[in-house]
Image (cartoon, helix red, strand yellow):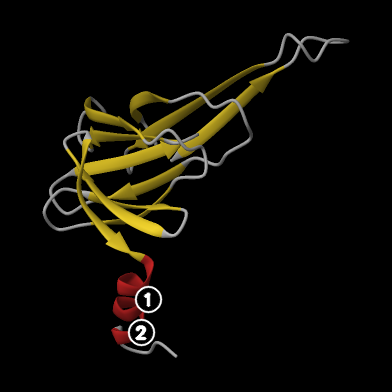
């Protein structure tokens, strides 16, 4: 579960402090861990994806963090240098597909593993069952 907390001191917008966290909560409603999410200069959303190998991905402000779903410990971090980066899908090989403007990047172990052009991704999306 992604949570964002904003603290602003009365009368001043300069003292604004913003924090983001990923929580894992058990079925008994106990907090198993709380992991900080990268801070962002803008109001970008926190995006979280869960992969098939117990790796989760969270991002905010152009930074993608891979973490262990069981412990919340960071596995790796990648800074795309663009606050508009959006994680799109967790892939079976442990990488995450990230949209960066008009291209898609497969990111694994903190580095770009493979770029995909947007027209390739549109082809893949059209081939999915039930797509228009």
Q: Is residue 93 left or right of residue 132?
A: left
Find the distance from the CA under tag 1 to the CA under tag 2.
6 Å
| Left or right: residue 43 compared with residue 80 | right
Q: How many marks?
A: 2
Q: Position of residue 114 (x, y in %)?
A: 19, 52
In the rendered image, the vertical position of residue 107 relative to residue 80, given as above or below: below
The residue sitting at the right extreme is 11
Disc number placed over residue 6 in the picture, else none: none
Up-down relation of residue 52 to residue 119 (above or below) = above
Q: Mark 2 highlights which residue?
A: 126
Q: Which residue is mark 1?
A: 122
Is disc 2 placed on a helix, strand or loop? helix
Q: Residue at x 56, y 31 (%)?
A: 4
Image point 23% across, 25% down: which residue?
A: 73
Write down the quadrant of residue 131 in the picture: bottom left
Residue 48 in the image, given as x and y percentages of width and height: 39, 45
Q: Residue at image x 41%, y 38%?
A: 59
Q: Name the residue located 37 percent from the left edge and 76 percent from the top edge.
A: 122
- State if disc 2 and disc 1 touch (CB < 8 Å): yes
Check disc 2: other Cα within 10 Å, few if <14, some if 14-19, many if 20+: few
For residue 40, side relative to residue 73 (left or right): right
Q: Where in the figure is residue 94, as x and y percent of width and height?
A: 15, 48
Q: From the image, which quarter does the N terminus lie in?
A: top left
For mark 1, does the 10 Å Cα neighbourhood hold few (<14), some (14 to 19), or many (20 or more) residues? few
Residue 2's place in the image compared with 10, above or below, is below
Depth check, front residue: 56 or 114 = 114
Quadrant of the image containing the C terminus: bottom left
| Left or right of 76, for residue 10 | right
Across and down, in percent, residue 24 comes to: 34, 35
Q: Please tell me whether mark 1 sits on a helix, a strand or a loop.
A: helix
């Amino acid at each position: 579960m992604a949570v964002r907390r904003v603290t602003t001191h009365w009368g001043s917008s300069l003292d604004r402090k913003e924090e983001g966290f990923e929580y894992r909560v058990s079925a008994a409603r106990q907090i198993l861990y709380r992991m900080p999410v990268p801070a962002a200069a803008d109001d970008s959303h926190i995006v979280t994806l869960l992969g098939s190998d117990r790796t989760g991905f969270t991002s905010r402000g152009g930074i993608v963090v891979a973490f262990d779903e069981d412990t919340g410990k960071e596995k790796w971090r990648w800074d795309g240098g663009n606050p508009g980066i959006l994680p799109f899908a967790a892939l079976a090989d442990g990488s995450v597909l990230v949209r960066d403007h008009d291209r898609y990047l497969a990111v694994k172990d903190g580095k770009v593993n493979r770029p995909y052009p947007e027209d390739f991704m549109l082809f893949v999306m059209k081939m999915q069952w039930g797509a228009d």
